[in-house]
Amino acid sequence: KGSGGNQQRVKLTLSVKVEAIDYDGEAAEIRLRGRVTSETSDQVRVGSYHTLTVAKTRALTIEKEEAPAWDFFALDVVAKACSDKAKLGVVDLAVLLVEEGYGSLHLIGSEGLSMKVAKIETRMPKKYGAAAAGITKAQSKFFDRCALAICQHIDFSSIQCLVLAGPGFTKDELLKHLMLEGARSKGSLEAGNSGGGGGPGASLASVLENKAKIITAHASSAFGHSLQEVLSSPEIAGRIANTRSASQIGALKKFYDMLSHDETRAFYGEVPVEAAGEMGAIEDLLITDTLFRNRKTETRVKFTKLVESVKQGGGKAFIFSSMHVSGEQLDGMGGIAAVLRFPMPELEDLEDDDDDESGSQASSDEE
């Protein structure tokens, strides 16, 4: 700080015991607030509160002394964040959910994360009366906007496939439009009519060159909730067989199938799954990363030990991202589920007891 209202920035290296974390997605910054534990300057006192801003290119050292400290989940997150794949932002799959006049483009990463990167809307005229004459023009405008979104957000050199999905025939008409416009763009580029090699024409020509990576699939709508429906189809599963999202989707499907055919080998919720874990009965454990981010240390430790015990016993543990549609589904079941090696009908009573306790707690809260 200077005199007369002038201020001067001073670079300091501080150690702070973090008490609160705030993430600003728009600024791509994390703010860590807590008490200063080491004094490096007379300008900041030990014990005073300070906020550190974490951003790209700013050096940061993280120390975790309290349990669970550097458990497998924390180390796995750090390792994947520092991998070349993460730095490159590799996307394995792109899904454009589309219906008449509306579309949403989603990218699915190698770590099972999904993100909606574009929403495409065009007002479509009525199919009868005088307005019907404008349907073809409006549809072409809508398809052009879809093509622009594809060119802006998809790198065909890294994805395994682009899925055009939705109800009816809109997705098929869009594919025809993309191929037609791609052929026109390629012809213009070969004739030297393009103003530059990196323009929209070049991108559309790339769509045509990668037509083998573009497939169509059925979906009940063009909205985000239909994404899981598309990813679960056998054809799409075959295309993304080597990605983490595919293994998660397969594990969730296996759980649902088991729940339908032998409900004594499929359970969800904390109480029955923990009991099955104590008996060494878990074949597949499905758990969301939400449980590992619980504010209570004992809760994080408990689930960390459960995952480790399942793996040590020869079982598989699938950690779902809460940012993926499959993770959202699992969160709706308490964030944890399991497929067992053998039937355990006695766990159904634990499930009922858990429901009764939840109901009693709710009634108490209302009173």
Image (cartoon, grey):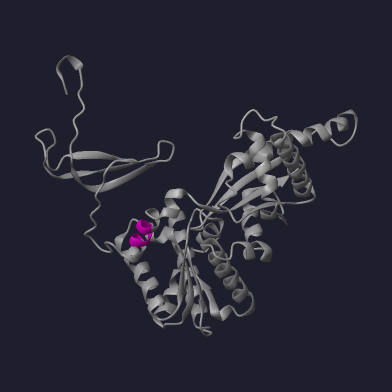
Residue closer to the observer: 75 or 45: 75
Q: Quadrant of the N terminus?
A: top left
Q: Is residue 120 magenta?
A: no
Q: Which residue is found at the position 16% from the left and 39% from the top?
A: 48
Residue nearer the viewer, 151 or 286 = 151
Q: Is residue 343 above or below residue 100?
A: below
- Picture coordinates of residue 50 (x, y %)? 22, 39
Q: Is any part of residue 350 visible from this angle?
A: yes
- Relative to 66, 74 lies left or right: right
Q: Magenta part mainly helix, strand or loop?
A: helix
In the displayed structure, would residue 135 be above or below residue 47? above
Image quadrant where one finds the C terminus: bottom left
Query: In the image, what residue occupies the spot 83% across and 34% down?
Result: 135
- Tell me the quarter of the picture where residue 263 sits: bottom right
Residue 120 shows up from this direction: no
Q: Considering only vertical position in the picture, is 219 above or below 265?
A: above
Q: Position of residue 11 (x, y in %)?
A: 19, 34
Point out the residue furthest to the left here: 42
Report the front residue among 215 and 131: 215
Question: How many discs mark residues in the rendered view?
Answer: 0
The reply, left or right, for residue 4 in relation to residue 274 is: left
Which residues make up the magenta segment?
Answer: 74-79
Magenta stretch containing residue 75, yes or no?
yes
Q: Position of residue 59 (x, y in %)?
A: 26, 44
State the image quarter where residue 7 is shown: top left
Give how far across and how far down residue 141 sits, in percent. Answer: 74, 33
